[in-house]
Amino acid sequence: MAQALTARCQHGIWRRCTNTRLAPQSLPTSRHIHLKTLQKREDAAQEWAKKAEAIKNGEARNLWEIFEERGFIKDVAGRPELIKELMRTKRIGAYVGVDPTAPSLHLGHLLPMMPVFWMYLHGFRAVTLVGGATARIGDPTGRTTSRAIMSNSEISTNITRIHYQMKKLWDNIELEKHKYGYKKTWSMSRHLVNNNTWWQSLSMYDVMKRLGRYLRMGPMLSRDTVKTKMESGDGMSVAEFMYPLMQGWDFWHLYDKLGVQMQIGGSDQFGNIVTGIEAVKTIRASEPNPNLKQPETWREDPIGFTVPLLTDSAGNKFGKSAGNAVWLETTMTSAFSLYSYLVRRSDDEVERLLKFFTFLPIPEITQIMEQHVLDPPKRAAQHKLAFEVLTLVHGAEVAIREQQQHLFMYSKGADGSTMSTGAAAANPNAPVTLNNAPRMDMQLPRSLVTTQSPAKILFAAGLADSASDAHRLCRQQGAYVAAAPGKDMRSLTPGNLDWTPVKLWRPEEVSRFLVDDRVLILRKGKHNVRIIEVVSDDDWKASGQTYPGEPGTGKTRMAIAALRELAEAEGKKLSQKELFALAQEKLAAEEEETVVHGDLKAKDGGRRV
């Protein structure tokens, strides 16, 4: 083994491991790779070879067969028998992309993500992509009208929300991995990327040189999307015409940097996938440096497939409810509504949905359906589907809560008197995760954001317990603002999601971080994010909202104002000192009443008193 590793170092298969000071000046140098890392790579390769042999001998399943068994595969770009062999013998990477053209993912987005999640669990490289750059163009596929141009603030908001939705999905996939007994290996890798990170530094000249000069107009003009837009729609812009090439370059970037050979997409994405495959092959072949040319055998060829279009028994597109998407964001579709939507699925479609949206083994799904047939009105299969999907999307605690609420609400004799919303059971001292993080979007008045210190803004946004706590956060750089990287204090680059620590800036300096002068994005820790819409002071006052630390909204001040108004109505005139004393008495009495009420409720076993 040691001899093999030494040979690899000597021949530079991985990277040059010799002392760079002894290297000839004409040769490029690279960072060292530790022998332990090389050993781990060698072990991973041997482990994969052992797994491939087990699949060949019928001792293990090929993941492509699992995809076929669960119905994931619709249209295939490539030869299925070669893809199957490739997935047996090589640890390829796969990706799925979503353009943030809306503030949330919806249920339909989840289907093409599921095969990528399966690949991760089986040891392949898995990538989810947020299209920060491509969203600014808009995919014309299946459309007769062009998408509306999004503002910088809108796209920044959408990217932030979808980025954290994908992070939450990946966090829950880690829990699913343990739940279903998948073994964690060193070579397991997953990535969440934004294509704007490479498009912002990519010149049009490079794209035309490596890709554009080799493409012919005939095949591109013959695509159904182009014909539909040109003949039945509002025409096609040059940007829309170039959209498949942008997606193709994304494929190439991931192919070149992360070893991604497979693209997975929704049922309408086959044309874009085929164009992307041709783009990868074209760019690969146009490499001018012979030392950087990549092999062009079937084992290195890009491939892809689409998942089926899901419709319910009535022919409606799955994930739509009364014409509206079923969102994965709880402020747009509540967790209870998502659970209810899945429970309402017909008996004809529930088995298929269990195969698509859960990691349950096929024998277990068969058993669930056999039990379901014995008593269909109980909708046992639908409840299992709803529980598993909510566990993936919102976490196990939310899934348990919503299942209990649904069963209680629709059980006989329920009056709703003890139904919990889950909010009261929340532990205020529990660490913030993506499954229990507070609501992201909120509003704050312009006078606060533009004239007050960063500490007061953090306190007002609920990211600190007090103004002094917020001041400490700023001093220790424990909070972040979405902004362009570097020391220039510039607002977020459109299409990106970068963070810089919040410091004790002057109040007027905070305005530099506003996107379109109307959105400020803050974060504390890993998951506690606020997307703040800055509204006029008049609109804030009219909304009736208040924020922590807002002048005149403290409990004592509000009590004094109420007592003064009451005294004046009775013709009395009280001094400020008298009003303050009365307010303290009033607040103390209210607090004592709250404590007594809580004790009585606890003694009564949580029932209403």
Image (spheres, rainbow, N blue to C red):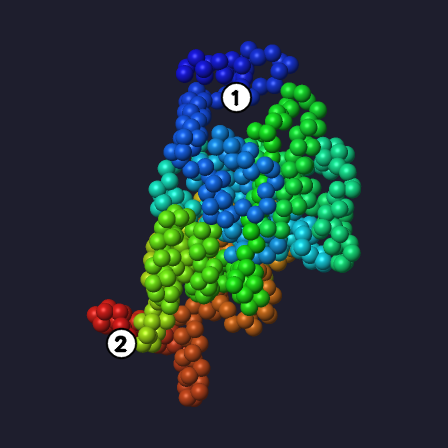
User: Label 1: which residue?
Assistant: 14
**Residue 344 sits in which quadrant?**
bottom left
Looking at the picture, how far across and down is residue 478, in whole percent? 45, 46
Q: Is residue 17 visible?
A: yes
Compared across the picture, whether 216 is left or right of 582 comes to right
User: Label 2: which residue?
Assistant: 609
Looking at the picture, how far across and down is residue 539, in whole percent? 59, 69
Which residue shows up at 44% across the image and 82% down it? 565
Q: Earlier in the sequence, mark 1 or mark 2?
A: 1
The three-letter code of the residue at mark 2 reads: Val
The three-letter code of the residue at mark 1 reads: Trp
Which residue shows up at 41% across the image and 75% down it? 560
- Say what secondary structure mark 2 lies in: loop
Instruction: Measure the alpha-carbon separation of dots 1 and 2.
Output: 71 Å
- Using the image as rendered, state which of residue 322 and residue 537 is in the foreground: 322
- Using the image as rendered, state which of residue 426 and residue 445 is in the foreground: 426
**Residue 252 sits in which quadrant?**
top right
Q: How many other residues sit within 10 Å of disc 1, few (<14), some (14-19) or many (≥20)?
A: few
Looking at the picture, how far across and down is residue 107, in whole percent? 51, 56
Q: Is residue 442 visible?
A: no
Compared to 59, does 170 lie above or below? below
Which residue shows up at 37% across the image and 48% down it? 363
Image quadrant holding the C terminus, namely bottom left
Q: Is mark 1 in CB contact (under 8 Å) with mark 2?
A: no
